[in-house]
Image (spheres, rainbow, N blue to C red):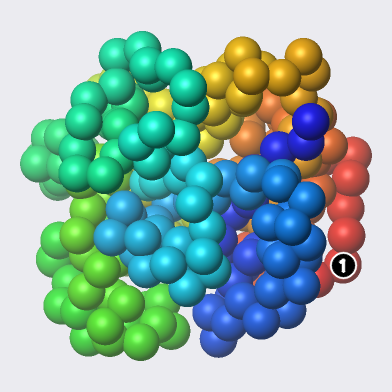
Amino acid sequence: MTTVFTDLGGTLLDYNTYSWEAARPALEQLRCRGIPCVLVTSKTRAEVEYWRNLMENSDPVIVENGAAVFIPKGYFPFAVPAAIGRGNFEVLEWGKPYGVLIAALEETSRSARCRVLGFHQMTAQAVSIACSMPLDQNVLAMQREYDEPFLIVEPARTNALLSELEARGQHWTEGGRFHHVCGPHDKALAAKTVKHWFDQLHEHVTTIGFGDALNEAALLEAIDVPIVVRSRFSSAPRTAYRMPY
């Protein structure tokens, strides 16, 4: 049994155009062969639902850098431990509340004397420009629940800011366009949890993972066959497997 875990932006979706047409044949082959394709992303639940519907994906999804897993109800023939029902999904959460993260980022920014610009301070139009994303999708991107993306306005103070975040017990990661402040979770923890559920159904599950940015490093280290999608737009994690982008 094989299970695929893949990032969205810069991996399954083109970094600039957000097109997934190049990946369509591979996704169709996975679907025909009954191989699950778990989307693992920094994007919000609202964004992922948009892409899942377009791609006709019906597998579990991991959102906001591993903050939560959304499992379609009835997907597994057993109850998912600690999951809560939410609409058509069972949800397992590790993320901190969004308001707590915003407050921590603002306090740390002042303490480290490093100005930042978080999503909560930006208009949908500004996010659209920063992400090169259509405005309607940016509205979905701003519906955050567990993770706050932010731009560092004073790059020379980056190390001071990140060190201060860590000193305050906060967690951060770096994506293709933004840094993120988040809870005590990452994509690897969520992916391992999902793999454990698949292991209960099959004797042995081989995982294949795709990612392009530093916030995929932990995920790819937890995958049996990690593949880095190299991009000139983001710093790629180091791993044994690479493929050209």
Residue 22 picture location, percent across and down: 73, 79
Q: Nearer the viewer, residue 164 or 192?
A: 192
Q: Quadrant of residue 162?
A: top left
Horizontal placement of 23 versus 47: left or right?
Answer: right
Residue 21 picture location, percent across and down: 66, 81
Horizontal placement of 97 versus 91: left or right?
Answer: left
Going by the numbered disc 1, the residue's amino acid type is Pro
Q: Residue at x 57, y 45 (%)?
A: 38
Image height of 219 relative to 9, above or below: above
Q: Quadrant of residue 120?
A: bottom left
Q: Residue at x 9, y 41 (%)?
A: 99
Q: Nearer the viewer, residue 211 or 213?
A: 211
Q: Nearer the viewer, residue 164 or 14?
A: 14
Q: Residue at x 62, y 76 (%)?
A: 20
Q: Residue at x 33, y 26 (%)?
A: 92
Q: Quadrant of residue 153?
A: bottom left
Image height of 184 relative to 67, above or below: above
Image height of 49 relative to 228, above or below: below
- Label 1: element kind: loop
- Kindly tell me whether residue 172 is visible in this rendering: no
Horizontal placement of 55 versus 146: left or right?
Answer: right
The residue that label 1 is drawn on is 244
Position of the N terminus by quadrant: top right
Position of the C terminus by quadrant: bottom right
- Kindly tell me whether residue 136 is visible in this rendering: yes
Residue 231 picture location, percent across and down: 72, 68
